[in-house]
Amino acid sequence: MSKEVRHRQIAVRRADRPGDLGWMVMAHGELYDQQFGWNAEFEALVARIVADYAVKRTAAGEAAWIAEVDGERAGSVMLVADDQQGVAKLRVLLVTPGARGLGMGTRLVEEALAFARTVGYRWVTLWTTDNLASARRIYQHFGFVLTDEAPHRGFGHDLVGQTWTLDLLDGSAG
């Protein structure tokens, strides 16, 4: 009995279609509940991030991407401006369980960082929690360095919040 190998169609595109932003919120809410037992407080945070992007986005300095597998949404990431000049934030990175292992998280972050360089950001930061090991490996792959860590009560759990930073000029934090 031979095993048929099916080649999956993978694409990363701008999050500019109706439903893309809503999907980001829904997917985060559902997946983080299923995987980590996080409550609706997390979904509300993602909804605020996505709503701020939708309302305040500057096309010249902010963008979002959707990853698709076989034409279905399977991942997301955003790059938004920080309050500090020259600093961007990487937000809402997600890859659905069925699409993991295809390199989509890496492709999404790669796309966001290429955009950050093109539009002239000097630094990219992100906030995450220490239990998100797969995402952390992606960040470390690109040279992000842990710059702050503190206990955090959120989403119904005691967590450790982390800030990671990437210097786009030399690949290290500062």
Image (cartoon, rainbow, N blue to C red):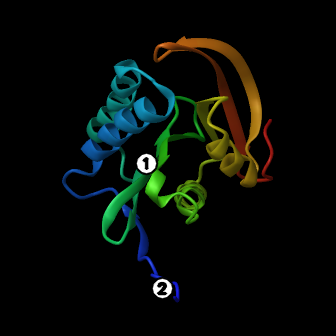
Q: Residue furthest bottom?
A: 2
Marking on residue 169:
none
Q: Position of residue 128 (x, y in %)?
A: 59, 31
Question: Label 1 sits on what residue type?
Answer: Glu
Does 168 sit left or right of 30 as displayed? right
Does 107 sit left or right of 67 as displayed? right
In the image, residue 76 above or below residue 92: below
Marks counted in the figure total 2
Local packing at callout 1 (Cα closer than 10 Å; few below 14, some 14-19, many 20+) is some
Quadrant of the image occupied by residue 164: top right
Residue at 62 percent across and 44 percent down: it is 135
Residue at 71 percent across and 48 percent down: it is 137
Residue 35 or 13: which is nearer the viewer? 35
Tell me the CA gap for discs 1 and 2.
41 Å
Q: Which residue is mark 2?
A: 4
Residue at 41 percent across and 77 percent down: it is 9
Residue at 53 percent across and 57 percent down: it is 100
Question: Label 2 sits on what residue type?
Answer: Glu
- Of labels 1 and 2, earlier in sequence is 2
Which one is in front in this view, the residue at disc 1 or the one at disc 2?
A: 2
Q: Position of residue 55 (x, y in %)?
A: 26, 36
Q: Position of residue 80 (x, y in %)?
A: 46, 41
Marking on residue 62:
1
Q: Say what secondary structure mark 1 lies in.
A: loop
In the image, residue 166 above or below residue 17: above
Q: Residue furthest front?
A: 1
In the image, residue 73 above or below residue 92: below
Q: Say what secondary structure mark 2 lies in.
A: loop
Residue 55 or 106: which is nearer the viewer? 106
- Can residue 61 be seen from the camera position used here? no
Q: Quadrant of the C terminus?
A: top right
